[in-house]
Image (cartoon, helix red, strand yellow):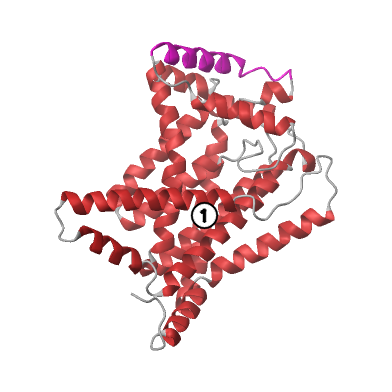
Amino acid sequence: MPILTSDNRHQQWLDIKTTLQQDRLLYAYVFVTTLALYLMSQSVTLESKIEYDAFTYLETLISICYVTFLSWSTGYYLYLAYHKTPHPLVVYIKTLLGFFNPLSKAVSFILLVLALNLTFSCYTYLKSIIPDIKPFQYDLLFYHLDNWLHFGTDPWQLTHQWFSSIYSTFVINFLYNLWFLLMWGSVLFFIVRRDIARLRNQYLVTFMASWLFIGGISATLLSSAGPCYSHLVDSELNHYLPLMDRLMQQSISLETKGLPPLWALDVQDMLWLKYLGRESGVGSGISAMPSMHVSIAVLMALGAYQLNRKLGYLMWLYVVAIQIGSVHLAWHYAIDGYLSIVLTLILWKLCGVLARKVQVTN
């Protein structure tokens, strides 16, 4: 099936123009924020000498898309074979070609992946230079706020009382890591679902804005390292050493029972080494307040609820699991998640207003 012919070339071009117009809010946001971050990087002198790279995540996103395609191809072909579909290979190829017809589907997907790369690259750059702009200084304050909000008890003590076994911690760690897969799946879903234009725009703009305004700007203003790093940043902030010791003991116990160790501890060590080396790359930078895990979990719940209420309720339960996990695994103070919920709801409402205006214009 030819993608472009002399008969449909003009129509394909019109489809591409229409698609670009429908996504203009997304592209405008990415253009303005990327330009602003680039100009900032050129105008400030940082002690760490970390440089802004607009394509930090491009290779990673291409790899993720490739793995996603292979997974879909394998699953879809097995599905056709299981249901004994006549000529499964022909059906598979026709479905695959459908991704490129009209051509605007493929063009839009490529451009939005590039936009995601720019969004993540801006976020990682800003997160990496937080200590240069505003050194970590609020960890002790957030510790006391946590203690006060929970009636004199540290939140991690509550979670480890409720989920005291090593298996509970293992499941919590698994759910916390599952976030990455769910995040990518949700973004991919809304990228391709053009039939729900307003919700699609609202979700994707909120998603991109969350990384900069919640994970970047708010994290800089509320500069904190987090429970797992507080004692490393300041030796006097040793309130969470018992938690780190407990997690280490649980990780060792899991290994003795033939299970994987707690992945969170290895990731925390990796991020700390990158921080010490003042490296900037995929996933680099440490910051606690606010929590992007909680923020994106809330966004996924909001989006899911608009599609299916039962799915939405399930995703709100997942928000609770992420909030608990962020504290249980020493990534965050409890108030990091509480603030993230509020900020994400505000962004969701604001982006919803913008999405409605764009839809009316279209």
Tell me if residue 330 can be seen: no
Does residue 250 show up magenta in the picture?
A: yes
Q: Secondary structure at mark 1?
A: helix
Residue placed at 35% from the left, 69% from the top? 195
Task: Indicate left or right for 323 with 7 as reference.
Answer: right
Task: Indicate left or right for 19 with 227 as reference.
Answer: left
Task: Indicate left or right for 34 with 197 as reference.
Answer: right
Residue placed at 65% from the left, 46% from the top? 124
Which residues make up the magenta segment? Answer: 235-257
Tell me if residue 327 can be seen: yes
Nearest the viewer among 231 and 41 is 41
Nearest the viewer among 315 and 20 is 20
Residue 39, quarter of the rendered image: bottom right
Residue placed at 47% from the left, 75% from the top? 19
From the viewer's perspective, is residue 32 above or below residue 47? below
The main secondary structure of the magenta stretch is helix
Q: Position of residue 293 (x, y in %)?
A: 51, 40
Amino acid bearing label 1: Phe
Does residue 10 show up magenta in the picture?
A: no
Nearest the viewer among 59 and 56 is 59
Q: Position of residue 2 (x, y in %)?
A: 37, 76
Total labels drawn = 1
- Which residue position holds label 1? 207
Q: Position of residue 125 (x, y in %)?
A: 69, 47
Residue placed at 38% from the left, 50% from the top? 70
Q: Residues within 10 Å of mark 1 (few under 14, many from 20)?
A: many
Q: Position of residue 329 (x, y in %)?
A: 51, 26
